[in-house]
Amino acid sequence: MDSSRDNLFTRFTTFWWALFVFVGFGVLLAVIWLFNNSEPKNLEDVVAEARYKNKEDVLKAQAAALPQETIDKAISTVATQLAASKPAAVSTDAQIVPGSARAKAKEAGGSVDPTAINKAAAESTDPVDPAVVEKGKASYLLCGACHGQNGEGVPMAGPPLAGSEWVTGPVSNLVIIGFRGLTGPITVAGKEHTEFVAGMAPMAAAMTDEDFAAVLTYIRNSFGNKASQVKPEWVKAFRGEIGKPQLPTSELIKPEAK
Ligand code: HEC
């Protein structure tokens, strides 16, 4: 700069210009920020909002305490639909995808001769562990949709488990019913059932050995039934049944007449 123009006055003005430009940019940035600060509304946000709203409505409806008949009706509707739905049938080993959950389940245990297991269960004198029964009760909610929460059966959805000779009979039947489902007319506690056209779908293939054993222990020791507990290793022994077609009732091992 020309030294003759370098005086206090120019320095002072330059300072104010600089400050002015600096603050000016600051204000500009603040304005830009304000304009861009509104909530972004992308598809996910809109969907999330709708879901929160739905959840709120559901919670409100639940809080309004539904009458028991409404609940019972809803349960039997769900059960009827479940009963009518066709299970995905994997009928040959060649159809099992290598590395799939189903293939792993199969590797975990092969099919075995049920005689030894059924004998061990029938002769077992081990006391039934109440903690296992309690655990089984929680998973039974699923079965209860079709068999009734008190094992009383649900019209058009599932036969009773209360007083069923199948439930207190050979353990292998129960494990295989869970892994393959069941089809065909069946007599339970003296009453013949032919109304379950779709039969029962495999319901336990995804359960752990412990959980499924606990459910079976629960049904064998509830609703007035009394039988041995079911050990997780007995469940595991039949994992090779997973993926076979629905078990025809004619292939069940007959329980001893009571
Ligand atoms: C979607 C409905 C449905 C669900 C859920 C269901 N079942 Fe079944 N179950 C049936 C039907 C239907 C039959 C009769 C099948 C036939 O013979 O055609 C049956 C039969 C049975 C039988 C033999 C008959 C009897 O009444 O003793 C047993 C035992 C059984 N189920 C146990 C279970 C267990 C344990 C669960 C839960 C892991 C379960 N079921 C879940 C529908 C269901």
Image (spheres, helix red, strand yellow):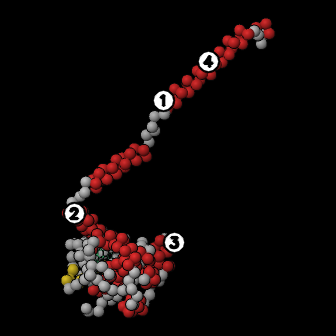
Decide which of 134, 213 is in the foreground and name it: 134
Residue annotated with mark 1? 35
Q: Which of 28 and 135 is in front in this view?
A: 135
Sequence-first disc among 1 and 2: 1
Tell me the number on the disc at residue 99. Answer: 3
Which residue carries the number 2 mark? 68
Which residue type does callout 1 highlight? Answer: Phe
Q: What element carries label 3?
A: loop
Q: What residue type is labelled 4?
A: Phe
Q: In which quarter of the image is residue 229?
A: bottom left
Q: Where does the image place residue 170, in percent across and percent down from the top left? A: 34, 88
Image quadrant holding the N terminus, namely top right
Q: In front: mark 4 or mark 1?
A: 4
Q: Residues within 10 Å of mark 1 (few under 14, many from 20)?
A: few
Query: Which residue shows up at 29% across the image and 92% down it?
Result: 256
Q: Distance between the residues labelled 3 and 2?
A: 45 Å
C-alpha distance separating marks 4 and 1:
23 Å
